Image (cartoon, helix red, strand yellow):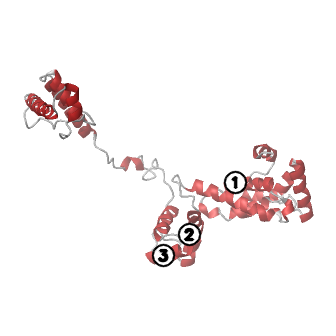
Amino acid sequence: MTTTALTPSFSALPVPAEDGFKRYLMDIRRFPVLSAEEELRLARKFAEEGDIKAAHQLVTSHLRLVAKIAFGFRNYGLPVADLIAEGNIGLMRAVKKFEPERGFRLATYAMWWIKASITEYVLQSWSLVKIGTAAAQKKLFFNLRRMKEALGVSEMAELEPAHAASIAKTLDVSPAEVVTMNRRLFGRDSSLNQPVRSESAIERQDLLADEGTDVETRLADHQESQRGLAWLRQGLGVLDKRERHIIEQRRLQDEPVTLEDLAAEYGISRERVRQIEVKAFEKLKKAVLLQAQPSQAPALPFPPLSV
């Protein structure tokens, strides 16, 4: 039996509402707490026969446990209703995997599934930037607030080195990780579309500096590049077919062709190819410089001469 098959059967569970938390607590109190014998009987019935009504009774009898655990995570700024909903998912998973023959009560087993479901939700919902899923990072995330309170520095946005070192030693992480996590917990994500002031139409993103090249500079660079390419194309016209081919292969390629390969292609010596290249380059350079004043001529886009 799959989890997807179980989920729709629990649609009758009370739904927590953020503005009616007390009402939700009253609603779940109507479900009786099961004795050990009743719990064992229902668990066997579900495990052996797939009885959904038995599973429903197991779930509803532990909704108070979910609410208690979820309430312990209320200081992370997330709606308690959402925490309870996530905890209920963990509870249903625990019921599905519960093995009554092992001799443990369901509450003892389900507690870990409920906490795991809620902690995963908190980690995913706390920030748009992933906080980290390593065990040490999770431990730091969920214990930093308590340890700051014990040190009397709960309101500090920037921890002193001594405090960071003390917390790091206890939680087996580096002081730098403590400082970074503290900054992230102290300052939540803020929208770039948030107005600078309540009465202002200026948003935070309007004040961000653009570190890229400005439009005028990009346009000037593009025009200069286009002009240089036009001069180059016209300059290549003064070369004969062999000179142009050698220049293109030796100077205008990302990976220049070797002198040996060109010598084999033309049936001449390596030194002769080098001489033709040097002569052709001088002709090309003069042709380009004739099209503009020397001070205005751009640097030719040729790689260094290779051998």
Q: Is residue 303 above or below residue 121?
A: above
Rendered image quadrant of residue 229: top left
Residue that label 1 marks? 86
Indicate left or right for 8 with 196 as reference.
right
Q: Earlier in the sequence, mark 2 or mark 3?
A: 2
Label 1 sits on what residue type?
Glu
Name the spot of residue 249 as percent of width and height, x first: 23, 31
Q: Earlier in the sequence, mark 1 or mark 3?
A: 1
Pair 2/3: label in front:
3
Residue that label 3 marks? 165
Q: Which type of secondary structure does the marked residue at label 1 adopt?
A: helix
Label 3 sits on what residue type?
Ala
Pair 1/3: label in front:
3
Label 2 sits on what residue type?
Leu
Are the residues flagged by discs 2 and 3 in contact, CB closer than 8 Å?
A: no
Q: Is residue 284 above or below residue 34?
A: above
Q: Which type of secondary structure does the marked residue at label 2 adopt?
A: helix
Name the spot of residue 107 as percent of width and height, x first: 80, 63
Query: Could you tell me how far apart the alpha carbons at marks 2 and 3 are, in whole angstroms?
Result: 12 Å
Are the residues flagged by discs 1 and 3 in contact, CB closer than 8 Å?
A: no
Q: Is residue 78 visible?
A: no
Residue that label 2 marks? 144
